[in-house]
């Protein structure tokens, strides 16, 4: 038995997302997504990269699934491209879109890999954006119809379902910072988008139950841990606001049926127009879920200040030994702390749906990719998952971001997170050392020191 043994019910997987790997952006009747639109605007994505071809997973999925099988991946997370299924976002269904996901999932199942399907990983149909996107309350019904179609098509084949992924990126990133699609900048709109997103999540959960889809459903959030840089009351309060902005703003409505009153008041006092929230909305949002997907990459260190409006805080670069190629600090203890904080606040069943690191990979002359930094990152973080599990956090499984290098949003292909290297010129796949290392972890259901 390995020293760090994760127990017999624990599962091991890897994650990816439709837009980041599929390519085939306008093939077989697919409609345009907001990310297709965004990356075709010069200057929005590094090097002018687009998702037009990406890893060409749309055509090469049999090869990719064979690699997953070779590595012993037990669960693979994928997302469904909404505009592949509904080119206009609603109304007419594209049968070829459904066929593609049926083929992918059948191939996974034939190879002993359990699919984990996320309904929304950011590629909104552009036609719906033209109608206001997440700012239009009608989106709750559009998302409901899309979800129902997917549940009906894949029913009985999928054990894990995720509704929406990382609400904070969708609303704060897309509606408050410019650097993710649709690229709007207005904090009040971000909160309205968030509220509609939470309602759409609740509606999908309702439909999931109505359709007797089978399996388990949850949503996926990214929960960095926030630390104040001093113990002054101002810095401690700023850290608390930052934490609530990521965690409680989305999870309190889901698990407690209300928004966090203190942050709500703070926003009001800072001139933010808050969404109108009814009892009925909160009932819909708090529809019970089966698990919470948790992503973790790094920690936030903050002090009070006026750089980040309206939270009134400043991010401070911490004194840690490693930063990834994204410039993110490596702070494994934050993983333990965030899992325990979620446990204390809500105590849900959790699945680690993403954890991983971008590092600059060198391909040796013999073709080998010796990505020791990534192995070190995964090893140090998995130890913290183990510790949280020992201390009572209900963690059912762990998934690395990502199975393969892919389109890293506004960074294009310049950042590599994969266990499998992609040569973007030839589209050749090469398993990195981290892939072989992780394969051993899976085989041993854990690892030694
Ligand atoms: C996210 C997304 C992924 C990213 C990954 C690395 O968490 O932002 O789920 O699509 O690629 O996290 O940034």
Image (tube, rainbow, N blue to C red):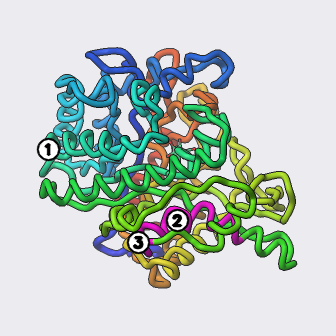
Q: Nearer the viewer, residue 312 or 379?
A: 312
Mark 1 CB near ligand 1 (8 Å cut): no
Instruction: Report x, y in % for residue 409.
Output: 57, 33
Name the residue located 39 percent from the left edge and 61 percent from the top edge. 281
Label 2 close to label 3 by CB (< 8 Å): no
Mark 3 CB near ligand 1 (8 Å cut): no
**Sequence-earlier tag: 2 or 3:** 2
Name the residue located 43 percent from the left edge and 79 percent from the top edge. 347
| Vertical order, 232 against 316 (above or below) | below
Q: CA distance from mark 1 to mark 2?
A: 36 Å
52 relative to 39 in the view: left or right: left
Mark 3 lies on residue: 395
Instruction: Report x, y in % for residue 361.
Output: 62, 35
Q: CA distance from mark 1 to mark 3?
A: 29 Å
Magenta range: 240-257
Q: Nearer the viewer, residue 135 or 219?
A: 135
Near mark 1 (Cα within 10 A), the count class, few <14, some 14-19 or many ≥20, is few
In the image, is residue 246 part of the stretch drawn in magenta?
yes
Mark 2 lies on residue: 382
Near mark 2 (Cα within 10 A), the count class, few <14, some 14-19 or many ≥20, is many
């Amino acid at each position: 038995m390995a020293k760090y043994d994760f127990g017999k019910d624990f599962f091991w997987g890897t994650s990816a997302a439709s837009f980041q790997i599929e390519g085939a952006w306008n093939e077989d009747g697919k409609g345009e997504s907001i990310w297709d639109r965004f990356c075709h605007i010069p200057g929005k994505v590094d090097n002018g990269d687009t998702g037009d071809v990406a890893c060409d997973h749309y055509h090469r999925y049999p090869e990719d699934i064979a690699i997953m099988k070779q590595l012993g991946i037990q669960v693979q997370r994928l997302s469904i491209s909404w505009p592949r299924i509904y080119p206009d976002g609603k109304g007419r269904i594209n049968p070829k879109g459904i066929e593609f996901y049926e083929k992918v999932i059948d191939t996974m199942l034939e190879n002993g890999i359990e699919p984990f399907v996320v309904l929304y990983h950011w590629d909104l149909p552009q036609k719906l954006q033209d109608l206001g996107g997440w700012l239009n309350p009608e989106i709750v019904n559009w998302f409901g119809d899309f979800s129902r179609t997917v549940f009906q098509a894949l029913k009985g084949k999928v054990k894990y379902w995720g509704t929406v992924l990382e609400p904070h990126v969708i609303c704060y990133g897309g509606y408050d910072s410019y650097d993710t699609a649709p690229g709007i900048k207005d904090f009040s709109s971000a909160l309205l988008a968030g509220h509609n997103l939470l309602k759409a999540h609740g509606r999908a959960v309702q439909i999931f139950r109505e359709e007797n889809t089978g399996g388990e459903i949850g949503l996926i959030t990214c929960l960095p841990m926030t630390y104040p840089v001093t113990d002054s009351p101002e810095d401690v309060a700023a850290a608390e606001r930052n934490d609530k902005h990521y965690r409680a703003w989305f999870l309190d409505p889901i698990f407690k049926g209300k928004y966090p009153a203190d942050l709500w008041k703070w926003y009001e006092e800072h001139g933010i127009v808050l969404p109108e929230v009814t009892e009925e909305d909160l009932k819909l949002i708090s529809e019970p879920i089966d698990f919470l997907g948790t992503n973790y990459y790094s920690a936030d260190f903050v002090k009070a200040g006026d750089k980040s409006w309206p939270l009134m805080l400043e991010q401070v670069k911490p004194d840690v030994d490693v930063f990834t190629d994204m410039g993110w600090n490596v702070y494994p203890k934050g993983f333990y702390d965030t899992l325990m904080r979620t446990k204390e606040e809500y105590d849900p069943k959790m699945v680690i749906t993403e954890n991983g690191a971008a590092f600059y990979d060198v391909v040796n002359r013999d073709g080998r990719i010796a990505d020791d930094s990534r192995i070190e990152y995964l090893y140090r973080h998995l130890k913290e998952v183990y510790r949280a599990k020992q201390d009572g956090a209900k963690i059912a499984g762990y998934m690395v971001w990502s199975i393969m290098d892919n389109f890293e949003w506004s960074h294009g292909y310049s950042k590599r997170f994969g266990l499998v290297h992609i040569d973007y010129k030839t589209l050749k796949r090469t398993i990195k050392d981290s892939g072989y290392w992780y394969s051993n972890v899976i085989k041993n259901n854990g690892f030694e020191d």
